[in-house]
Image (cartoon, helix red, strand yellow):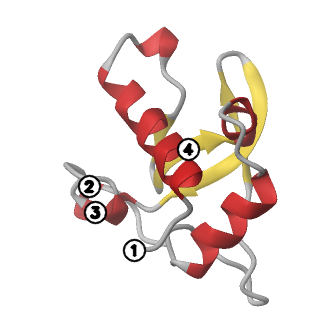
Amino acid sequence: MRLNRKVRDALALAVESLNGEPRAASAMTTPAGVFVPLSFLRAQRVEAPVALRELAENAMVSTRADGRAVTEKHEFAGEMELGIVLKPAFVKGFNPADFTAD
């Protein structure tokens, strides 16, 4: 997989945060995968358009008919946040069968 190092490192940090204190998590699981708020990516100095393009090109997130990444809103830390849902097949230790398919 060829992801920009900053994108890869930010996603790894978000996923790793799921192993810690729930209130301190930078991501959350959803029925479809791991939700990562775009605000977290920005805080990691990752440009959202770059991350969205790379994740879509590598089929790591759901895409629209035009090939662009689908963004979703979820309640996260008490706020509605816009973000992406990383497919569980790309998260080490996750069993995709435990999640709903696209």
- Closer to the chain start, of discs 1 and 4, is 1
Instruction: Report the front residue among 55 and 80.
Output: 55
Mark nearest the camera among 1 and 4 is 1
Rate crowding at label 1 as few (under 14), some (14 to 19) or many (20 or more) other CA atoms within 10 Å.
Answer: few
The residue at the point 79 percent across, 89 percent down is 66
Residue ID at (74%, 62%): 50
The span from disc 2 to disc 1 (Cα, nearest Å) is 23 Å
Sequence-earlier tag: 1 or 3: 1
Instruction: Kindly identify which residue carries mark 2.
Output: 98
Up-down: is 41 above or below 75?
A: below
Asked which secondary structure carries label 2, the reply is helix
Place of residue 38 in the rendered image (x, y in percent of width and height, measured from the top left): 73, 42
Q: Position of residue 40 (x, y in %)?
A: 67, 32
Q: Is residue 63 left or right of residue 33?
A: right
Residue 85 in picture, x, y percent from top left: 56, 54
Marks 4 and 2, how far apart in space?
15 Å
Q: Nearer the viewer, mark 4 or mark 2?
A: 4
Closer-to-camera residue (11/99): 11
Which residue lies under the disc numbered 1?
1
Amino acid under disc 3: Pro
Q: State the residue lying farthest toward the front.
A: 5
Residue type marked 1:
Met
Instruction: Say which residue appears at 78% left-offset and 30% top-offset.
Output: 80
If you read the primary sequence from the N terminus, does the residue marked by circle 2 or circle 1 appear first? Answer: 1
Q: Is residue 25 above or below residue 58?
A: above
Q: Nearer the viewer, mark 3 or mark 2?
A: 3
Q: Residues within 10 Å of mark 4 (few under 14, many from 20)?
A: many
Q: Is residue 94 visible?
A: yes
- Say whether residue 62 is visible: no
- Mark 3 — residue? 96
Tell me the amino acid under the disc marked 2: Asp
